[in-house]
Image: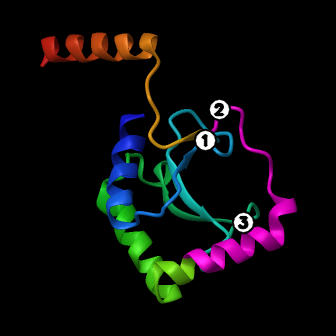
Amino acid sequence: MDKFNEIGENLKQIFPNIKIIGNYAKPEYLGCFDVYLKGVGPRLDEKNRYFIYRKINTKKFPTKHDIIDRLIALTMLYGSSVNMQAAQVQFMRAFKSNFAKPFKYVHDHPITYTEDAEREKQEIEKSYKKTV
């Protein structure tokens, strides 16, 4: 959740109109952290996604630069972020009926911890600091 929120904040600084959605599709594996766009990009998969980053390929969480640099490069293919947004909107309108329903745990950015999860996180951080 922290990485999702952190990267989302960095993206919003550069792309203020970006809509960030977490877990739109059911994660494919435990610890999944995929970043993709729907309907735009040079190679879309069978679910109309263009992957900016896949943790499974690198075995690590992305840095903000991993995501931002790739998004800027993709934006240049369209000439501007406004053109890329227009292409995505056009795609979404044309193929809206082909999109799967969102996963039951879909969420917007930023995501907040439940009280129980926040307590658990603090306990883990305390125990980690004791061992370091």
Kindly tell me whether residue 41 is visible in this rendering: no
Quadrant assignment for the C terminus: top left
Q: Residue shown at 53%/56% (left/top)?
A: 19
Q: Does label 1 or label 2 sit earlier along the sequence? A: 1
Which percent across, then down, holds residue 24?
65, 45
Q: Residues within 10 Å of mark 1 (few under 14, many from 20)?
A: some
- Magenta segment, prevailing SS (helix, strand or loop): helix
- Name the image quarter holding residue 115: top left
**Number of the label disc, if any, that sits on residue 35:** none
Q: Residues within 10 Å of mark 3 (few under 14, many from 20)?
A: some
What residue is pinned by disc 3?
48
| In the image: residue 37, left or right of residue 66 | right
**Number of the label disc, if any, that sits on residue 105:** 2
Q: Residues within 10 Å of mark 2 (few under 14, many from 20)?
A: few
Which percent across, then down, holds residue 54?
50, 54
- Name the image quarter holding residue 126: top left
Q: Residue shown at 74%/60% (left/top)?
A: 47
Q: In the image, which residues are magenta? A: 85-106
Mark 1–mark 3 Cα distance, whole angstroms, equals 16 Å
- Please name the amino acid that badge 2 sits on: Tyr
Q: Are marks 3 and 2 in contact (CB under 8 Å)?
A: no
Q: How many marks?
A: 3
Which percent across, then down, holds residue 109?
48, 43
| In the image: residue 47, left or right of residue 55 | right
* In this rendering, the label closer to the viewer, 3 or 2: 2
Mark 1–mark 2 Cα distance, whole angstroms, equals 6 Å
Q: Residue shown at 78%/70% (left/top)?
A: 93
Mark 3–mark 2 Cα distance, whole angstroms, equals 20 Å
**Number of the label disc, if any, that sits on residue 23:** 1
Give the structural element (helix, strand or loop) at label 3. loop
- Name the image quarter holding residue 90: bottom right
Kindly tell me whether residue 77 is visible in this rendering: yes
